[in-house]
Amino acid sequence: MDTSKSISPLQISKEPGVSVCIPSFNKAEYLGETIESILCQTYRNFQILVIDNCSTDHTHEMIQSKYKQKILYYRNHRNIGATANFNRCISLAQNDFLMILPADDTLLPRFLERTVEWMVKHPTAGIVATNRYYMDKDSTIRKMDEAFFPGTGVLSREYTIKRILERDGRGVTMPLFRKSCLQAVSGFRPDIFFGDVFTWFQIGALFDIVYINEPLLTWRMGDSGSMVTKAQRDHIYFDHKIYTYTEMFRFLRKHHITFVDEKSSFKNLLKHNTAKICSIQYPPSRKKLLSYLKTYFRKRCLHLFSFIQLVQISMIVMFPKEIVKKIYSAANRLTRT
């Protein structure tokens, strides 16, 4: 496929090439905006790859009509799952620097320029990450994310690991990867739901990470069909969190990294997830709620629940799910008036 229109003459110079990979499934509504944000980059030595995970919408037709000469397009014969599609991005990328950009997110014009500059300057860096904006379904910028680091520079491995654990993964954004470092940790693990956070964690333990405290990309929020929302609704979100933390510490022990206290880190995990396990928007079953409370009791963390959360727990125990949901809807209407 001819990709000359997506790659400037800089590709034949000494400027390093970047593969910007877009894993996509039924995102034709937003995919054009995502591609356009890459085409508008100030850094021009890149290729765009769309890896379509067997979409059933008009993704293929849209690509053929608008972007056939500007990108490399791959369509899986069957849906292989999100994580496997991320790993396919790694295998198809042709450059040493790699960006994986979800099909409904966008890059600001200087993302590649700034991240490549730092990646070249620091050959021991496995990741160069930036801050981001939250964007709604209408592409309106709503707010800036919490910074992973208050400044810009190279982070120590100890800082990265502790920060991820203390903040329950908040501030982790899609970065520019050094492909060899992604391959060193075998890409994204299919059994880890929070694969982006876990991959950051692994690379941060073995390589340097550069953080740029500028919002240079966007993340689209508010998708009721997203994997995270579905996990919260089905009450497997917290289970995934516990498993991810367990595997993180297994990884640290394997590499003889001992500067993190597992007990306090697990307490932080529980602290950050109190609201989710007693949600009256997505109330768990009584059995599931009791299993959560047993975990908090064993870890001596019941005091982490606020008064309002204790009221919500009582409601979930006392009333059927449908009644609890109606109470949530009524409370929501009252707060909006």
Image (spheres, grey):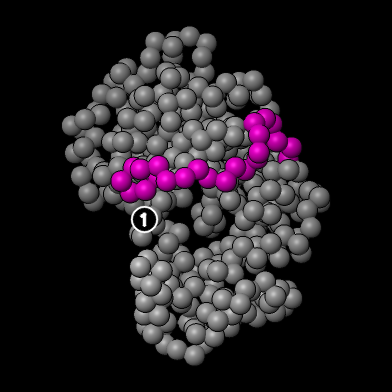
Q: Give the residue displayed 70% in from the left and 79% down from the top.
A: 297
Q: Position of residue 182 (x, y in %)?
A: 57, 38
Q: Mark 1 points at which residue?
A: 223
Q: Within the magenta stretch, is there residue 232? A: no
How many residues crowd around disc 1 within 10 Å: few (fewer than 14), some, or many (20 or more)? few
User: What residue lies at 51% left-to-right and 57% top-to-bottom?
Assistant: 193
Identify the residue shown where x is 50% and y is 22%.
113
Query: Considering the numbered disc 1 on the image, is that residue within a helix, a strand or a loop?
Result: loop
The outermost residue toward the bottom is: 318
Whether residue 3 appears in this view of the structure is yes
Q: Residue 319: x and y, percent?
A: 45, 89
Viewer-nearest residue: 268 or 326: 326
State the predominant SS element of the stretch in magenta. Answer: loop
Quadrant that contains the N terminus: top left
Position above or below: 37 against 266: above
User: From which residue to which does the magenta span run?
Assistant: 135-157
In percent of width and height, residue 132 lies at 50, 39
Q: How many marks?
A: 1
Q: What residue type is labelled 1?
A: Asp
Query: Would residue 92 be seen by someone viewing this image from the given angle?
Result: no
The magenta stretch spans residue 149: yes
Q: Can you say which quadrant of the picture contains the C terminus? A: bottom left
Residue at image location 81% in from the left, 50% down from the top: 259
